[in-house]
């Protein structure tokens, strides 16, 4: 009986030793040596893990940068102007210039301009309401106002105003991570270049219905008349599917389109008031 116990113990020990040796050899054979520079790059990133760079968190961006051995097409929107140059210095690369961007809300249909035709009494989520039906107003394209964008923003850069029911972007807090745009089921939030002196001109509407239907649903809707495109000297405006769009890369901020829009769907942001401008012209003359 004792011999059987001894043989059993010896056999189990032998099996354990052989298994350990096999596992060790397999581990060495398939070992993946991780580049130590990944840790260095990750340490320089802000650790927000917001996904604004298009990668799965800061670790994912660090791995992508080291693997690519280039910073082209890779950037951290949260890190500001110092992060990418610091990474470039560590890796011995050139840091390209990054144009500051900001989120804009392309919907001007506040509660006064969009008539309410029904009442949503479900779970307070834009995604849920959008999936169930067209919303409380007659516009099937506009903002639903339930704050999915605000909840998605980890920087408190966008909030839904109680008075208007529309989200408002706090430019000083926005890092252009794109989380709010991804969370919006209607696609009304877009990242655009901040522009010279943070000035921007854009069409604050995404309604693609014909003019009569669009205007009937919202007093601030673009009706696709094309007047703005005709007045633009820089070919920065196109009208497709009854909707005008301003290409911020071509726009020269002349604002002729703002004046020519019959519905006020084109917004100008961070410009001085026109009265101030006119008074300045009068002083100069």
Image (tube, rainbow, N blue to C red):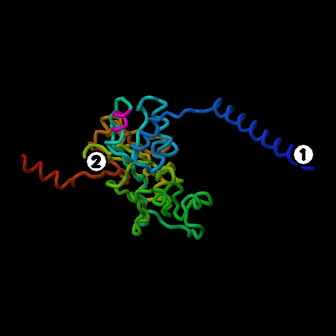
Residue at image x 76%, y 41%? 16
x and y percentages locating residue 285 in the rendered image: 6, 46
x and y percentages locating residue 123 in the rendered image: 59, 67
Local packing at callout 1 (Cα closer than 10 Å; few below 14, some 14-19, many 20+) is: few
Looking at the image, residue 4 sits to the left or right of residue 206; the answer is: right
Looking at the image, residue 196 sits to the left or right of residue 214; the answer is: left
Q: Provide the secondary structure element on which disc 1 rests.
A: helix
| Snapshot quadrant of residue 126 | bottom right
Indicate which disc, 2 or 1, sits on the residue closer to the N terminus.
1
x and y percentages locating residue 17 in the rendered image: 74, 38
Magenta stretch, residue numbers:
86-90
Name the magenta segment's main secondary structure: helix
Nearest the eye: 43 or 256 = 43
Q: Residue furthest right?
A: 1
Residue at image x 59%, y 60%? 128
Nearest the eye: 35 or 243 = 35
- Picture disc at residue 3: 1
Instruction: Report if residue 116 lies within the magenta region.
Output: no
- In the rendered image, the vertical position of residue 59 relative to residue 278, given as above or below: above
């Amino acid at each position: 009986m004792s011999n059987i116990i001894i043989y059993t113990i010896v056999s189990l020990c032998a099996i354990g030793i052989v298994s350990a040796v096999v596992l060790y050899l397999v581990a060495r054979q398939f070992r993946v040596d991780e580049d130590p520079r990944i840790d260095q790059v990750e340490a320089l990133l802000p650790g927000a893990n917001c996904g604004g760079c298009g990668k799965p968190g800061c670790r994912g961006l660090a791995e992508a940068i080291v693997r690519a051995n280039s910073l082209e097409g890779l950037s951290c929107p949260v890190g500001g102007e110092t992060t990418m140059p610091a990474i470039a210095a560590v890796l011995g690369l050139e840091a390209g210039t990054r144009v500051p961007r900001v989120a804009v809300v392309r919907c001007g249909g506040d509660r006064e301009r969009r008539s309410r035709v029904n009442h949503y009494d479900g779970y307070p989520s834009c995604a849920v309401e959008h999936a169930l039906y067209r919303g409380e107003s007659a516009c099937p394209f506009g903002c639903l106002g339930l704050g999915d964008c605000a909840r998605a923003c980890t920087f408190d850069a966008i909030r839904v105003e109680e008075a208007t029911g529309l989200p408002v972007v706090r430019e000083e807090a926005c890092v252009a991570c794109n989380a709010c745009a991804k969370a919006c089921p209607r696609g009304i939030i877009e990242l655009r270049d901040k522009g010279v002196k943070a000035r921007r001109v854009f069409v604050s509407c995404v309604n693609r219905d014909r003019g009569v239907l669009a205007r009937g649903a919202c007093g601030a809707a673009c009706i696709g008349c094309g007047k703005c495109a005709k007045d633009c000297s820089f070919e920065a405006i196109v009208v497709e599917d009854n909707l005008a769009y301003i290409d911020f890369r071509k726009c020269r901020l002349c604002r002729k389109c703002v004046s020519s829009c019959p519905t006020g769907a084109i917004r100008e942001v961070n410009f001085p008031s026109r009265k101030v401008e006119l008074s300045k012209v009068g002083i100069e003359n």
